[in-house]
Image (cartoon, rainbow, N blue to C red):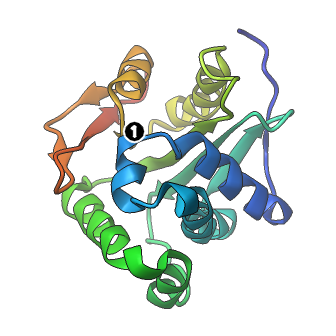
Amino acid sequence: MTGVPVERLGAGETRAVAELIATAFEPLAVTAWLVPDEAKREAVLAGNFEILVDHAMRHGLVHGTADRSGVAVWFPQVGEPAPPPADYDDRVAAACGEWTGRFQHLDELFEANHPHGAHHHLVFLAIAPGRQGRGIGTALLRHHHAVLDAEGVPGYLEASTERSRDLYARHGYRESEPFRLPDGTPFFPMWREPAGR
């Protein structure tokens, strides 16, 4: 699929973006570990993701397709670091309830495995169920990779499935040693050098 229109989204769409990510991520092994109660999983995820999407609206970049079937959330980590989300611990506890410790554990894993050096971090790439596999993720990646390539900035992400890992590999990301949740579910850290560098 080519020619998918991509645009930057504004703060008024924060909740809708969080809900789309939660819907797309609900079937993943990592979210089953984070929220074992399937009946509550999607709502808890949306509440947690809203904290990060809200922060990205202020200090990062949130892109979506024109029809909102796909979204990408990026945090530039170049120059002065952004402040942490306001009241983060309290907001996570309010959103995640009895599973707060699991989300905190995941945050610690991400922090321990995050690379140093200037880059843009792709925190979320989410495509609506039923629209996956149609080139929407590719369109979102290409949109921001054009900026990274022009500015000579690497990209970084943590792929949560082998399928997504393979998608990112096709876009120039190289996998490093995976890290794992306590139940063995892997994350695949991936790094992309800007094209032409």
Split into 4 quadrants, where in the image is the C terminus? Answer: top left
Count of numbered badges drawn on the protein: 1
Q: Give the residue at x 45% y 61%.
A: 37
At mark 1, the secondary structure is: loop
Q: Give the residue at x 13% y 37%.
A: 177
Q: Position of residue 117 (x, y in %)?
A: 29, 54
Please identify the quarter of the rendering in which residue 98 is found: bottom left
Split into 4 quadrants, where in the image is the N terminus? Answer: top right
Q: Give the residue at x 79% y 51%.
A: 9
Q: Is residue 125 above or below residue 35?
A: above
Direction from residue 187 to residue 100 in the image, left or right: right
Badge 1: residue crowd in 10 Å (few <14, some 14–19, many ≥20): many
Direction from residue 115 to residue 147 in the image, left or right: right
Q: Amino acid at mark 1?
A: Pro
Q: Is residue 32 visible?
A: yes
Closest to the observer: 1 or 174?
1
Direction from residue 32 to residue 43 in the image, left or right: right
Closest to the observer: 44 or 156?
44
Q: Is residue 7 above or below residue 174?
A: below
Q: Position of residue 55 (x, y in %)?
A: 61, 70
Q: Residue furthest top?
A: 1
Q: Position of residue 106 (x, y in %)?
A: 30, 63
Q: Give the residue at x 50% y 73%.
A: 82
Q: Position of residue 99 (x, y in %)?
A: 39, 74
Q: Is residue 18 above or below residue 30?
A: below
Q: Is residue 41 above or below residue 98?
A: above
Disc 1: which residue: 154
Q: Is residue 118 visible?
A: no
